[in-house]
Amino acid sequence: MKKITLEGNPLTVSGEQLNVGDKMPDFNSLTKDLAPWSLKDITGIKVLSVVPSLDTGTCQLQTKRFNDEVSKINNVTIITISLDLPFAQARWCAAEGVDKVIILSDYQDREFAKKTNLLIDELKLLSRTVFVLDNENIVKYVEYVEEVSKEPNYTAVLDFVKSL
């Protein structure tokens, strides 16, 4: 279990998290357009940008930053996952011009949350995390952001992806 906080207050994320070298389990989710989606349907290098909610400033910054960076990196798919409803995700993407990132909602079955042990017990939201997966969905890089209100280390993530 990773230790995380929200504004310095401890939160609980139960279970073992994935580490570099682990295989990301396949999971089903919904796109912001309510279409079914599965990890096995995407090939190549993937960056999974996990956020608590697109309705928060930090999550918005994170999603916009990765959206802006996508066009600069060849052969990489960036996927943002939250527990927001697909309707809210679609509305937010349209308002913010986010169109290069795959936006997924895990609200329905919380399958991603369960398989990755990223559900914050107290908030019932996902813990801010970034994974880089290879073509076989092996975790090559992971950042568990310890303070939920902070952004991930974009430079480290993007430099790592560019080195692949």
Image (spheres, rainbow, N blue to C red):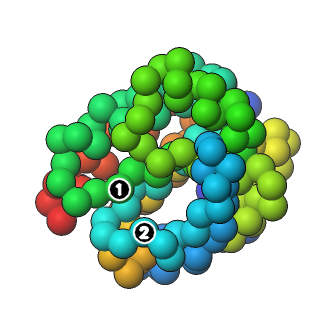
Tell how many labels.
Answer: 2
Looking at the picture, how far across and down is residue 110, in whole percent? 77, 59
Of the numbered discs in the image, which one, if any, rests on residue 77? 1
Q: Which residue lies most toward the right here? A: 122
Above or below — where is 99 with respect to 43? above
Q: Which residue corresponds to mark 2?
A: 42
Q: Residue at x 50, y 76 (%)?
A: 40
Q: Residue at x 71, y 34 (%)?
A: 87
Q: Residue at x 25, y 47 (%)?
A: 158
Q: In the rendered view, does 137 fall on the left or right side of 54?
A: left
Q: In the rendered structure, which amino acid carries the disc numbered 1? A: Thr
Q: SS class of the residue under badge 1?
A: strand
Name the foreground residue: 56 vs 152. 56
Q: Is residue 84 visible?
A: no
2 or 1: tag closer to the N-terminus = 2
Q: Callout 2: few (<14), some (14-19), or many (20+) C-alpha neighbours within 10 Å?
A: few
